Image (cartoon, helix red, strand yellow):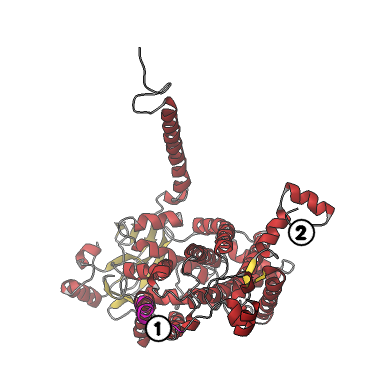
Amino acid sequence: MSNPGVTNQVMQWVETRLPIFSFINHSVGTEYPTPRNLNYWWSLGSIAGVALVLQIVTGIVLAMHYVPHADMAFESVEHIMRDVNYGWMMRYLHSNGASLFFVAVYIHMFRGLYFGSYKAPRELLWWFGILIFLAMMATAFMGYVLPWGQMSFWGATVITNMFTAIPIVGEAVTTWLWGGYSVAGPTLQRFFSLHYLLPFVIFALMFIHLWALHTSKSNNPLGIDVKSEKDTLPFHPYFTTKDLVGFGVFFIILAYWVFFNPNYMGHPDNYIPANPLVTPAHIVPEWYFLPFYAILRAVPDKLGGVALMLGAILILFVIPWLDTSRVRSATFRPIYSKFFWIFVVNGLILGWVGANPAEGSFILIGRIATAYYFAHFILVMPIVGWFEKPKPLPDSIAASVLGDDTAKEAK
Amino acid sequence: MTTTTPEGGHEDGATRRDFLYIATGAMSAVGAGLFVWPLVDQMNPSADVLALASTELDISTIEVGQAITVMWRGKPVFVRHRTAEEIATAITDDSASLPDVALDADRVQKAEWLILIGVCTHLGCVPLGQKSTEVKGEFGGWFCPCHGSHYDTSGRIRKGPAPNNLGVPPYIFLDDSHIRIG
């Protein structure tokens, strides 16, 4: 048997017909070598995976009670909240779970940015991560429309109207998306259908993401390549256990939001049924879209705003080539690491601007922060990487973690 | 007859099998294309949505300076009984610098009745300014609270991110006090 772990007769019978046990062992078991120095920032990927599964499970349950019809959607959500056994818990898990899914993914992305995980040979791994992020945004947007409250309706109206910015075919495309001349019943029903579909698309993308990960293997906080077996530990039990600690923290945080503060990240206007004649005074998207919403509003031109917002995400695809530094980890990049934190703060500022009405000084701050967002990728990444003198890299992961002496002795 | 071509083939090396591959591929592409169109087109407005809905209303009860909102094709339509002052401003502003140039006279059938689609041309919010208590923006017409577009007393965009004037729906005066929109 190729897998020494399979000793049980029944397992061996299965293994010879379908090598599932060796596959698991090869993927997340003792046969998957993992850099021994991974810190807790590396737990966010598996936490995002758990969040996805949680969304799918609670979503399937909610779909058993929800009615995707313009006249009944709002009431069916209230029915879930008041009448269905544990319906309130399923819905709060689903809505707060979505938020925490984004928290996990955003930390995961910033982790990748800081430690240079997008650089060769992990460009495709990074690309599939961006595709997952885009699919998540579409899924979250359509999910937010389903309760058919005021924010659902007007959020859907504002976002779908962005397609009217496309020259010539914009109006036709928007009518096609709506299935009518405004956001209405047909829009709600197709969004429900797609909201059910997309999580499985994300699931498939996640497998390709993992496939690419298992090909190039994990990056690590030092950003240097694995050179020998001494640099690694088997994934199981070392990192399965470490990931479990992360899951525990994730569930504690989730439980706080679900049981103690379930509506904090929502918006009270969404408890008013959709009314096509009255626009709420202040339309804001969910918090995870705020930085991009700020970029949209920073441009006083409709097409320009939409293009820039889209560009803010698409630019992530080319950063493996915009970053000219040969050192992956910002730990060894004295100048870039400072710019990284400025970029993080700038992202928070964009989010804060996006949450506020587009007036007064918010317009100016939003424009400066938007300009800086793009400058980070277009100017800082190529220029700093070119002239910065990185700190000396350690000889190996083992040398850095175990101390030089131990590593030398082992040699 | 002497032959140098491969069995069942031609002088350029192409075989009957190559022809079959290309023909099969081409037919499959045509078939797939034909099936994709219904899948795409089913998302366009259905026949009942397309059926040109029209809205009739009595405007005799709308006092000068008042405005009402009616629904037409799922969208709000603004019907405003303009004051003489508002009409005068709208005509004077014909020569102002307008992002989307249009004469007030081309936007109304009867000067006192301004009838517009109440959807901001930026991202589709319903502008404020229908009720006397609502803000009407810097030009006395409408103000869109979503992203700050200002419309004048002819519904023309004057300031803000919206690219176009508020649309004018098709409508006719049935008599002096009734109109039909659509």
Specify the principal SS of the magenta part: helix
**Element on which disc 2 rests:** loop
> Residue under circle 2?
A4
Q: Which mark is residue A389?
A: 1
Q: Quadrant of residue B60?
A: bottom left
Instruction: Return the residue nearer the eye: B111 or A18.
Output: A18
The residue positioned 43% from the left and 66% from the top of the image is: A317
Asked if residue B23 is positioned above or below residue B129 in the image, the reply reads: above
The residue positioned 41% from the left and 81% from the top of the image is: A357
Residue A397, x across and y down, in percent: 58, 77
Magenta region includes residue A129: no
Which range is magenta? A379-391
Looking at the rendered structure, the kind of residue marked 2 is Pro
Q: Quadrant of residue A144?
A: bottom right
Q: Is residue A247 left or right of residue A225?
A: right
The residue positioned 45% from the left and 71% from the top of the image is: A278
Residue A18, x across and y down, in percent: 72, 49
Q: How far is mark 1 from mark 2, CA to CA?
A: 48 Å
Residue A323, x across and y down, in percent: 40, 73
Q: Is residue A23 left or right of residue B51?
A: right
